[in-house]
Image (cartoon, coloured by chain):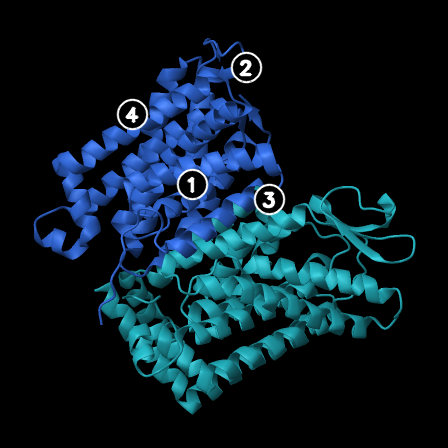
Amino acid sequence: MAERLFKNIGSRGLKGAVKGSEYRKEAFISYGILLIGYILLQLGAMTGLIGRNLQGQFVPICVYVSLAISLNLVVGISGELSLGHAGFMAVGAFTGILVAKILERSMSINPLILIIAIIAAALTASIAGFIIGIPILGLRGDYLAIVTLAFGEIVRNFMNVLYFGFDSNGKLRFAFNHTIEGVDTSDRIITGAIGATGVTKMASFTAAALLTAFTLFVVLNLKNSKQGRAIMSIRDNRIAGESIGLEVRKYKLMAFVVSAALAGMAGCMFGLNYSTLAPVKFNFNTSVLILVFVVLGGIGNIWGGMIAAALLTVLPEALRQFADYRMLTYAIVLIVVMICTYNPTIKARVGLFVDKFKPKKKKSGKGKTGKEAA
Amino acid sequence: MNFLNSLISGLSLGSVYAIIALGYTMVYGISKMLNFAHGDVIMVGGYVSFILTMYVGMNGWLALLVAMVACTILGILIERLAYRPLRGTGSLAVLITAIGVSYFLQNSALLIWGANPRVFNSLFNGMKTIHAAGGQLTITPESLFTIIANIVIMIALTLFVSKTKAGKAMRAVSEDNGAAQLMGINVNQSISLTFAIGSGLAAVAGVLMCSAYPVLMPTTGAMPGIKAFTAAVFGGIGSIPGAMIGGLLLGIIEIFARAYISTELSDAIVFACLIIVLLVKPTGLLGKKINEKV
């Protein structure tokens, strides 16, 4: 039964994406949400309606929204469960910090440094995605999920023993233990489990929003291209896709690498938003958090994921009045929302109720797909 | 001798992983879901046993029994309240709910028992450490009992699943849910039973683990949970002997990596081994190959 359900929803999603009008609508809504969100938050910050605490969350909100969009490329559009998105984010963040540190010594235009750092982050993260993607994309379903989990943990583990610093000649050196040859303790920029310290804060809300727009642009255009349709048809039926001559591995890898590069870019923005950054920020929980955004927003539904990401990033902040009960409330909200959105009986009832006010609400179920059911 | 000592502690750690992995693998087998809250059930088991021995003054073994009962009830409740409403909606929705349950358990523990690490009283406090080979080889009662417990549980569980009616029903449900229901098997009951067994075993694993590594925190269960999950996949998820082999191998690899290569990188090495195994055998060591039908 579940299998049929998956296929049904899957094919609906595909048909929806093929139609040009559907694409335009999705793009319109996604960019619209981003623009309106940006303007509202800017206005709120200018008029002082939004407090300082929440203003500090602006860049993370954009970063998490970007991450939700890029993970949706793997989970929703390519139909593979990935539990290691934070790994790519970490690769991007630490690359970005290193590049920014090096460039800072000879350049003083921060936005330019930021752009170069982001490009470098995209590069290294896509290389990481390529290396991990080639061997694992032959695996199926939950096995692929566990390997991505393993990858995320390996990255974090390596970050824990990675040390970078400048020696007296200004040359960058690295080591896998505390003492780097020719580098003073005070000149270290990345110190193992403590992470990066003394980072110049280069990220800004506008830059982060632009990055989100870029991520959206890449993912939406990929989804609506020939390649995107190939990726989605493989998701819906791998064997059928193979039989009409689609190279399964190539397309899966394409989605995976693009997603990794975008995650690296978001990670770079995240890294350059704080003065210190520890590898523990990129643990399994972060990967899961991003996945929660994607699933809660409706798998494959890009703007749904964006809204979920923004709301859930703000939620712990908004729940501050519950003090100690904050995370507990978060957990309960998560479980209840999941049951309400996915339980067939409740979904039907809520759907009826919502339909009375807003006939378009039902659309949110459209982009959902199951993983390959066969 | 160093080698043998490492091997013993590896086997002991691996046994803990194996017992936890059993819960993962059985639940996966029957309901095709990754129960990420399983690791936190271990933590709850540890805390229940800790409170009973420290504040109520209960005998450690009796406390273990109560913890098992508590975790069994907890497991059934979790399944009933959080997972059953989502049955048949695809593994991702349930996965996220499981993560929600995991957060819920961790934060409840944080509220009830606080964030401070507690020092767990070993279940085997009165017993002596065995010294062999002229004092070079040491076997702590913790490792000895953990290894024995693992073997006993494994044999009992294999017998239960293959010989008893309830076990056969469980296997039938994991093979084909719908067909089993048509044969008059109570699917809900079978799944509840699986969660009950898995959670009860989690309590045992929790007490054994805290006896060997006596620090108890709300996040104590998280990392062993992930490792045990890895172990289950390592051995082929869904397979009971697979969980045992996977768990033992993982424990041994971890301890040897710690002893001979690097403490900090031991986790990375464990996970790298997993990736290599999955590349050679994509469904784990003892996993069944699933044929795709058009």
Query: CA–CA distance between discs 2 and 1?
Result: 30 Å
Residue B290: % across, % down: 26, 59
Horizontal placement of B40 versus A114: left or right?
Answer: left
Residue A76: % across, % down: 43, 70
Task: Tell me what residue is drawn at x 46 percent, y 44 percent.
Answer: B226
Q: Is residue A72 visible?
A: yes
Q: Amino acid at mark 4?
A: Val
Horizontal placement of B175 versus B150: left or right?
Answer: left
Query: CA–CA distance between discs 4 and 1?
Result: 19 Å
Q: Amino acid at mark 2?
A: Gln
Q: Which chain is blue?
A: B
Chain on which label 4 sits:
B
Pointers 4 and 3 within a single chain: no
Task: Tell me what residue is drawn at x 48 percent, y 28 percent.
Answer: B7
Q: Is residue A50 visible?
A: no
Which residue is labeled 1 in the image?
Answer: B228
Residue A32: % across, % down: 56, 81
Q: Dot 2: what SS?
A: loop
A185 versus A136 height, above or below: above
Q: Amino acid at mark 3?
A: Ala
Q: Earlier in the sequence, mark 2 or mark 1?
A: 2
Assign the C terminus of chain B to one quadrant of the image. Answer: bottom left
Q: Which chain is cyan?
A: A
